Amino acid sequence: MSDRTATHRVRAYIGLGANVGDAPATLARAVDAITKLPGVRVRGVSPLYVTAPWGVTDQPDFHNAVVAVDIPAGPDRAAGALTLLAELKALERLAGRRGRRRWGPRELDLDLLVFGRNRIVVDRPAEARSIDAETDPAKAARRLEVPHRDAGERLFVLAPLADLAPGLVPPGWGVTVETRRRHVAATEAPDAVRKVALWHAERGAWVREPASG
């Protein structure tokens, strides 16, 4: 695994999602847990979004957000990404995440979206595999791909990521996150992804904006 004592740091972006129980509270606890990972410095937390279910629609709406972190990269970027991913999967388990059908309900979903300027495709060790790998053979065989293979197609990722890094051009995309967000948003229903609250760092929670008027 990567050396967390290395001085060179990488900016990574982590996608958060949940739709079981008190999802905003779960995601706030996840942000707090991420801040406590070894060597990790949280640099930004996006607003909170409510998202219509994707893939399987007979379930509650999701809450989604993105967190920007700086993390020691170590000499091997793939190992550094796998270390972070394994820690995120451990946090999912601590939050009570259970394996379910594909695109089904999630107690907590944490995805590594971007890891610096690196394109990474690598086999996952057991500790970095999706919890759904136990029930979904496709997930069991899936390698880690960074940038995340589906990030550029999903508005619930692009919207909060654009709040933090609109000018970012993830490796292999050729366009900025904001450009991609606009393109995908034009194909979605206007209320498919709705911003509902802003992150309040001192409270460690998302706070809904007061209604105008």
Image (spheres, rainbow, N blue to C red):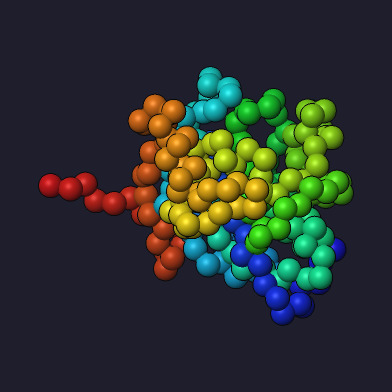
Residue 99: give x, y in percent of width and height.
73, 33
In this picture, residue 152 sits left or right of residue 162:
right
Q: How many marks can you see?
A: 0
Determine the residue located farthest toward the top in the rendered image.
Answer: 58
Residue at the location (58% across, 22% down)? 56
Residue at the location (45% across, 37% down)? 183
Residue 87: give x, y in percent of width and height.
73, 57
Quarter of the image where one finds residue 75: bottom right
Residue at the location (56% across, 35% down)? 153
Seen from the viewer's position, the closer of residues 20 and 48 is: 48
* Vertical arrangement, residue 191 with respect to residue 112, above or below: above
In this picture, residue 93 sits left or right of residue 208:
right
Quarter of the image where one finds residue 5: bottom right
Determine the residue located farthest toward the left in the rendered image.
Answer: 213
Seen from the viewer's position, the closer of residues 119 and 23 is: 119
In this picture, residue 121 sits left or right of residue 68:
right
Q: Decide if residue 83 is in sight here.
A: no
The quarter of the image holding the N terminus is bottom right
Seen from the viewer's position, the closer of residues 131 and 11 is: 11
Residue 145: give x, y in percent of width and height.
74, 45
* Vertical arrangement, residue 17 with respect to residue 2, above or below: above
Residue 93: give x, y in percent of width and height.
71, 47
In this picture, residue 1 sits left or right of residue 132:
right
* Vertical arrangement, residue 98 with respect to residue 48, above or below: above
Q: Decide if residue 175 is in sight here.
A: yes
Residue at the location (54% across, 28% down)? 54
